[in-house]
Amino acid sequence: MDLVLPRSILEDIRAHARETYPEECCGFLIGREDGTRRVVTQGRRARNVHPEMREVRYTIDPRDVLHVDREFRADIRHLGFYHSHPDHPAQPSAFDLERAWPYYVYAILAIPRGEPSELTGWLLDAEQRAFKEVALTIV
Amino acid sequence: MGTVKVYIPTALRQYADGHDVVELPAGRVEEVLQALVQRFGALRRHLYGEDGRLRNFVNVYVNDEDIRYLKKEETEVPAGASVSVVPSIAGGSFLQQQAARIAPPRRQAGDLPFTMEEIKRYSRHLILPEAGIEGQRKLKEASVLVVGTGGLGAPVSLYLAAAGVGRLGLVDFDVVEHSNLQRQVLFAESDVGRPKLQAAKERLEGVNPNVRVETHATRLTSENAMDVLRQYDVVIDGTDNFPTRYLVNDACVLLGKPNVYGSIFRWEGQASVFWAEKGPCYRCLYAEPPPPGLVPSCAEGGVFGVLPGIVGSIQATEAIKVILGKGEPLIGRLLLFDAMTMKFRELKLRKNPDCPACGTNPTVKELIDYDAFCGISPHDQEVGMEWSIAPEELKAKLDRGEPVVVIDVREPMEYQINRIPGARLIPLGQLPYKVNELSTADEIVLHCKSGPRSATALRFLRELGFQKLKNLDGGIDAWVERVDPSQPMY
Ligand SMILES: [Zn+2]
Ligand SMILES: [Zn+2]
């Protein structure tokens, strides 16, 4: 599976991560399925409502999830999420894995010292309970 | 009673036959959700924990209200209302010390598409005229799918990873067994019992962390083959069975991909590059598979452990040549190798204009049922309950001194490792010539290693009029395991 991300959405994610640094930011990836590819057509910010340690944890307000899931269920659908790793590499953590759902693509943006760097995409292999990296194309 | 609508999130639709919304009878939340998982069994483990309670990480809404703030699962869902199953989304990063968290940025080597580390690693390629920086860049941008991580897949994937192929896909669903270690050099003793893909990924990333190893833990089927193969530039056939070999060939023809073929048996190997756009395909060579049971597999006939190292290395070489676009690939040539005489021979292959896959009027326009095509039907492996006997039952008969004729249809080498006392050895291939030595009046029990060969023998004898036949269920493997553990297994 390949993830296609327009540069403008990448820039929005980077800006979001800068704004919340040193806390994690989080949000939705919305778009369409195109064969083996997922093409993101829209990003949407979410609030990190984790009660504490937001430098290393995020929780998306469940009502935000409900609304995105309701709004985008046809051709344009809810494809996954993004979140930032302040001062950590763009590798999924054990906690990311623990809380991962099938199907969704999880994009992780590393933001060392407040300046966004690498973005990676991950997909849960539900059988093996492990993450698989997805190929990312910025267009 | 009216109905309610249950909304399924994209994450779970694959477990609900793709439905995004399902109508179910109105009732309490718990009744609605139970009806949901009853209809879609695969959903259950995503919604309910092992204790049978709704998982913590599942939020349920009735209309716009979280049931946690209503009467939880007792909440009534009136007709016309909606129930939304909403995944709880959380994550985070790591909890260690700040300083150690970011690896130092990788140093790019000037304008070159490599890091300093890669320049060192690939230096022997970079100074090789036919590869060079341009060739190494092609390898880095290339993707190769290795179907099967057995004897052939092991050397192929090791060499391709070491050579710096950017993306390496592996398809397999087996676990590592002791009997693999004699030739499958990807794996160590400590890997026995682990999924092959997990062990292979670790080993290959250890060889070269620049390579992205993608694992497909599945049996390649007509349903998934196109989607998997499509993602790669080159496909390596490292399979050990005919259905998968024809499947890989046909999918490659349909997708226009090169198929780097190899096969091994005992001391002999074959290799070629099947690429329908430039030459023949596997079906041009063998339009139809041999009858089932006629060609023994390596598990039945044995294989020289170094042989896959030689044939797999040839496949890796051909894959790299195809990626570099250099040299003369094995297109239209079948290379035959005999380790006993240490001789290579070459057969010219021609594209068959009548080839059902790549000919002028192809009949294969989509993937078919390859098990059926190869004459393997699900019940072929078995012979039916009335024709089989359990090891314990056979043991009891022998102990009682009943006149049972036990025929071992394995090969002599296998017979030397373990055997049922008093069993007579008639290898499957010799059965037609020795059949007149058997009597239809005798009660005959047939066995092989695990069952399929003796099932073939049983069907053969049955067609000749033998009636008092039994197939030993699970073969000598089951016999040793359940009746006589003092004997070795192989
Ligand atoms: Zn994370
Ligand atoms: Zn052909």
Image: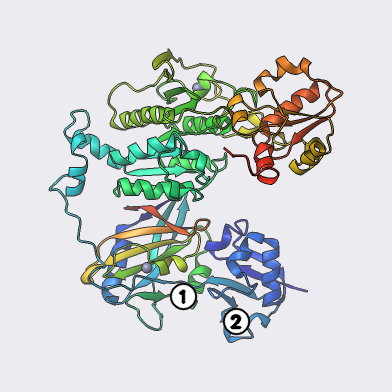
Disc 1 element? helix
Looking at this view, is B175 or B62 the one in front? B175
Q: CA distance from mark 1 to mark 2?
A: 16 Å
- Residue A117: where, in percent of width, then height? 25, 63
Residue for point 39% across, 77% down = A47
Disc 2 element? helix
Three-letter residue code for mark 1:
Asp
B179 relative position to A119: left or right: right
Chain on which label 1 sits: A
> Can you say whether A7 is above or below B58 in the image?
above
> Can you say whether B211 is above or below A92 in the image?
above
Q: Which quarter of the image is occupied by the N terminus of chain B? A: bottom right
| Quadrant in the picture for residue B346 | top left
Chain on which label 2 sits: B
| Quadrant in the picture for residue B157 | top left
> Can you say whether B254 is above or below B17 in the image?
above
A46 relative position to B372: left or right: left
Report the residue marked by disc 1: A64
What's the mark number on residue B67?
2
Residue for point 59% across, 22% down = B288
What's the mark number on residue B101?
none
Residue for point 40% across, 42% down = B186
Three-letter residue code for mark 2:
Ile
| Quadrant in the picture for residue A41 | bottom left
- Residue B490: where, in percent of width, then height? 57, 37
User: Is residue B233 visible to the viewer in this orientation of the structure?
Assistant: no
